[in-house]
Image (cartoon, rainbow, N blue to C red):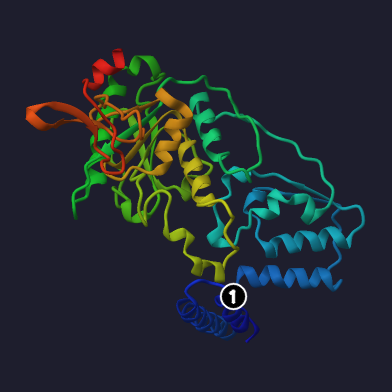
Amino acid sequence: MEINKMLLERAKSLHDKPRAQHFARAVWLITEAYSRKLDEAKRIDFDSMIGDAVRLVETGRYQSPYSLILVDEFQDISDPRANLIKALKHQKPFTKVFAVGDDWQSIYRFAGSDITIFTQFEANFGACWQGRLEQTYRCNQLLADTAAGFVQRNPEQIKKTVRSTRAAIPRSIRVIPVSVEWRKPSFPKACFQLLDRLNTFLEGIAGQWRREAGQKLKVLVLWRYNLLDPFHGRHPEFSAIEVTGLSFHRSKGLEADYTILLDVSEGDYGVPSRIEDDELLNLVIPRPETFAYAEERRLFYVALTRASRGAFILCNRRKPSRYIRELCEIAGNEVRFETIDGKELDQCPSCLVGELVERQGRNDTTFYGCNQFPECRHTQQTAPALAKSA
């Protein structure tokens, strides 16, 4: 009953109170039914196990023999698990906690992770020494620099400089705008076209990278939500590339030669995902950070840094993600805009994410304007290619 009161009390602080109260009651009913099922089956779940462990340590029924506690993936720590670590640390004098993690890759708030336990480590666990591991073996230096600049636009992220063992590959970030038609599977089709193109290209230069017969380069196709999965669990076969498809979340810890990021566009289910910041979630998981879409930014950082050779970003031609604009602001001309078959596009110099297209003016005159109109009203009289050479 205390949980029900707590949820209803929290609901009062949200903007849409009636909606929040309905949600709180629904959560309470589901929680009650779930608890009854556990009792009937004489089982406990993981959260209950952690809670029981904390009580055993705090009451002294369990005496810890450990003076050193090592915690990996500390950026994913939740409040109950942090309480267990604190209980073990405080029970035995001079116990040390050694935690390893990367706050740039904290992406599990939906599972209870609270990044402030990591970023405010000293407040939670006492005086500490902090070291930084700043070398990466995964992505090339251009991707590393761009992604680092992107994720650190949130001032709450811990600052560091990332050095890669792989030299920068010029223009290894490529944006491919896709014409999205109503109720047609635009991104799966574009994905297969790009895979065919990449396979043909790599097969043509196999002498530069193939060291043994049958060797293939790895390609990760990544998406924000599984409804965008173009493969439906069956990965295609190619002669020069080995293709795996996963969600952004499941790609954490993996690496490939190339990545293809699908539907990096604005929208409820886009990148950043708008539904992830629904205030109702504040009733049941840690409150969001003050920086807008903070965890979505880290999630995109994870997806972007899986590649060693290059990343292809597919977006809705009419609704490119705000994150693409940020990458252009950070990396400038190192971000290349191109068609699905590799032809370079004329990027709008004003909004950075639009394409300059020919338009008809008055008296049969011709000018060039951004296809993001009316959001971007940039125009110019000269052809884009001539403007570039000038």
Residue at 25% in and 45% down: 188
Picture coordinates of residue 279, whole percent (x, y): 50, 66
Left or right of 312, for residue 143: right
User: Callout 1: few (<14), some (14-19), or many (20+) C-alpha neighbours within 10 Å?
Assistant: some
Which residue appears farthest toward the top when viewing the image?
390
Q: Secondary structure at mark 1?
A: helix
Q: Is residue 257 visible to us here?
A: no
In-front residue for pair 289/357: 357
Q: Is residue 64 above or below residue 390?
A: below
Q: Position of residue 351 (x, y in %)?
A: 36, 35
Left or right, residue 69 beside residue 244: right
Amino acid carrying label 1: it is Arg
Residue at figure coordinates x 38%, y 15% from the top left: 208
Q: Is residue 214 visible?
A: yes
Tell whether 266 sits left or right of 368: right
* Residue 83: percent from left, percent from top: 74, 63
